[in-house]
Amino acid sequence: MDCVKCGAPLPPKSNICNYCGTLNETDLRALPGSEKEGAANERLCPHCGVNLRSVELKLEGRFVIERCDRCFGLFFDPHELESLIDVSVSNVHGIDYERMAVLIEEERNIDPPSFKYVECPVCHKLMNRRAYGSRSGVVIDTCKNHGVWLDGGELSQLLKWAKAGGQLHDKDQKAEEARRRERRERIKRETKPAASYEHTWEPGAGLDSDSDYLVGALGLILRLLR
């Protein structure tokens, strides 16, 4: 994707042009549909502190998300991000490991950005940070009750990841982890020591073998010595 001001190619995983320093809106440009901007609402950008603007996306179904006009960060209500990626990236039936390797290499060659915990645009409580999917290279800010915040440029990175089969790769990784967890639980059950017990002998009890007789006699002696 090129800079809208000078036309220079934008660096990987960044929407800031290295040549002219322009902050580009790369996320909505990466979507297959168009968008229609609405009015500003009461939700606040966790970085800029300004009111977010509603944006209606022209995709399958109706998507209304919030965007900051300054930093181009995006806020999604619960489950909207997953649904948006699903309808934006279709016909992916396999994992492009070569492309995945390129994305991972791009991630390694970029200095890790400084970060801070940011407030939810709705409740203003600090959000949690977690990696989105397996090897996407994107860490999202999440509020359990209200949704997900993506910094500018992170949605386009997630779309690249999904087009390379990232969602399928993530599904395979989760299935493998579930199998490993089940194996660990099975081994734990199978190797659990048998419950200890004390063999006692009651007078008149039947003895089926010499070993039973010795065990019973030993149990009686132990009881007498107590």
Image (cartoon, helix red, strand yellow):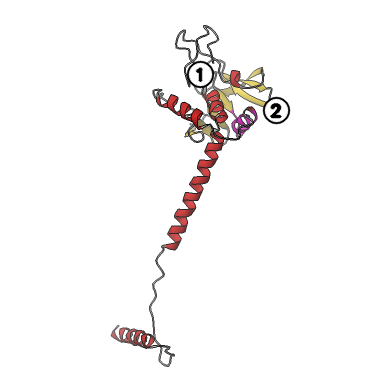
Q: Does residue 211 show up magenta in the picture?
A: no
- Image mark for residue 60: 2
Q: Earlier in the sequence, mark 2 or mark 1?
A: 1
Q: Residue at x 62, y 25 (%)?
A: 65
Q: Is residue 29 above or below residue 140?
A: above
Q: Is residue 217 visible?
A: yes
- For label 1, the crowd category at 10 Å Cα-Cα, with few meaning under 14, some 14 to 19 and many 20 or more, is few
> How far across and how far down the image is residue 203, in percent?
40, 92
> How far across and how far down the image is residue 152, in percent?
52, 21
Q: Is residue 177 above or below residue 63?
A: below
> How far across and how far down the image is residue 75, in percent?
57, 26
Question: Which-is-in-front pick, marks 2 and 1?
Answer: 2
Give the magenta part as a residue range: 76-87
Q: Secondary structure at mark 1?
A: loop
> How far across and how far down the image is residue 174, in percent?
52, 43
Q: Residue at x 66, y 22 (%)?
A: 57
Please state which amino acid type lies under the numbered disc 1: Cys
Front residue of 97/177: it is 97
Quadrant in which residue 108 is drawn: top left
Q: Residue at x 50, y 17 (%)?
A: 15
- For label 2, the crowd category at 10 Å Cα-Cα, with few meaning under 14, some 14 to 19 and many 20 or more, is few
| Residue on which disc 1 sits | 48
Q: Is residue 147 above or below residue 223?
A: above
In the rendered image, the residue lying farthest to the bottom is 204
Q: Are marks 2 and 1 in contact (CB under 8 Å)?
A: no
Picture quarter with the C terminus:
bottom left
